Image (tube, coloured by chain):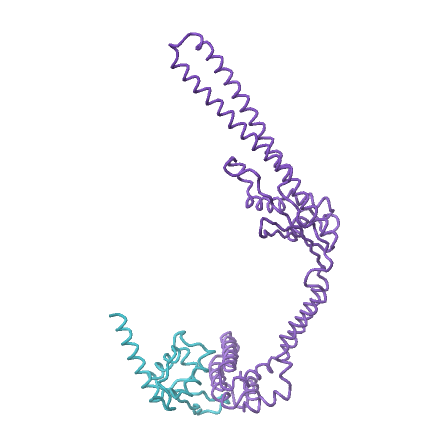
Chain colours: A purple, B cyan
Amino acid sequence: MTHVGDYRRLPGFRLRRFAEKRLDRSAVEMLVLPIIADLQHEYSSLPRSTVARLLVLLGGYWGYWKAIGLHMVTGPRRKGNLMVGFSMRRWTLLIFASIIFAGTATYGWFRPVMYRSETRLLIEPALVSDGELTASEIKDRVESQAQSIVQLLESRSMLERIVEEFRLRENRVPGMENAIKSIRKNIEIAKGPENVISIAYRAPDARAAQAITHRMAEVLIVSNLTSMRMKAMEKVRFLDNQLKRAKLELAESLGRTSPVKVQGSYHQQLLFLEQAQLQQHVDEIDRMKFKARMAADAIADVSSGGYRILDDASLAESPMFPTRAQFFGLGIAAALVVALPSVLVSRKGLRGSAQSAS
Amino acid sequence: MSPSGQEFPRLSSKEKVILDLLAERGRMYGLQLVSDSHGKLKRGTVYVTLGRMEQKGLIESEPEKLTDDSGLVPRRMYRATSYGVRVLEIWTRLARELVWEVGR
């Protein structure tokens, strides 16, 4: 047990003094003193210099502050208690507010100012109707085209081309991987209404942002054109082969039919059959011709590019939000929000609240 | 009706645990209630709950009379009032009936 006159060395002495200054008498008697009393008895029942004593102290202090916090929020004279709470934390809050402001201002100062450029593309649907297209042709519908745009713009080959062309690796970010990561971070692709896709790029330089955005749109259109030309050429090649085969088969059929005609009417049945086959070939050729016309339409579609630029890449006149000044403003606002309660609770106000609490 | 003339008081789970312990064992101090509740009561909340219960008239308290002059702050000993015991009995009976009704 602790000896007489040793009470200052007992835990809870300062906690009690603090509570007596800040809280009303009934709260001290009914809440604070029981906590301190239990803490002291538990503490003094343990042998000196043990870990158990340290644990008891930690538990006791935790219980004390939790109870004080609960009392402030749920106890009587709630407003006064809250004022006392703020006063307890006044300097902490002010320091915290200063740190917030300093941190925000420093970040805002060193953060590069960014400019944003945007271009809008219209995806033009294929001119041929779906019923006349094969499965691979149907793929070129607007939705899948939008997906293809995203994939193409974020593809490594595309980004490498941009990095090399604008010398982003040498100037700003070392290493191709980092340069690609940086570009990917700054690209924005959004699908708008009416088959419109917007492509935006953010860069520390307004002209660079505009040039890169413009180049991305250009590359996109050229790639799309190349892809569609290749598809159309494949189709034409296929149709050429089909036509050649059909013509050959037709010629063979005609060659077989002629001797039958000469031999007379007893081969009538066979003749009908041959004629029916012949008719099938003719129909087939008709269908091929129709498909060839459709292919021509598709090639005409290719000439329009599939994508059309609605708005060319814009040159940003002002940097993106937040600018340095706006960052400073944000920092001040955030710091004020944190510091306001402690600023409002003036010394006079505190005295008043303490008196009303007691 | 409660001593203050208001409607019948409600008992929270923590308040019920405290009343149960005090009704069963008589006088107890805060930390004793925490340790005997087997984790149902916490050190940070028990004193606030005890203060609230005392205001409701469910329990009463007085400082412990210390026989030695150790300088320790006397512990506050709590015990259930007769009103508190009655409230506990009614609550226990109601809970039992409710369980029976639900289980039927």
Residue at image point 54% right, 37% down: A137
For this orientation, the residue located farthest to the top is: A263
Query: In the depicted view, which residue is nearer to us: A171 or A121?
Result: A121
Query: In the depicted view, which residue is nearer to us: A211 or B72?
Result: A211
Residue at image point 57% right, 89% down: A354
Residue at image point 46% right, 83% down: A38
Residue at image point 57% right, 46% down: A147
Number of on-image labels:
0
- Quarter where residue A219 is shown: top right
Where does residue B36 sit, x and y in percent of width and height? Answer: 38, 78
- Quarter where residue B31 is shown: bottom left
Where does residue A51 sit, x and y in percent of width and height? Answer: 51, 74
Where does residue A230 sit, x and y in percent of width and height? Answer: 61, 33
Question: Position of B96 compared to A75: left or right?
Answer: left
Where does residue A308 sit, x and y in percent of width and height? Answer: 65, 45
Question: Position of B30 compared to A114: left or right?
Answer: left
For this orientation, the residue located farthest to the left is: B104
For this orientation, the residue located farthest to the front is: A265
- Quarter where residue B104 is shown: bottom left
**Relative height, residue A284 to residue A174 (above, below):** above
**Quadrant occupied by the C terminus of chain A:** bottom right
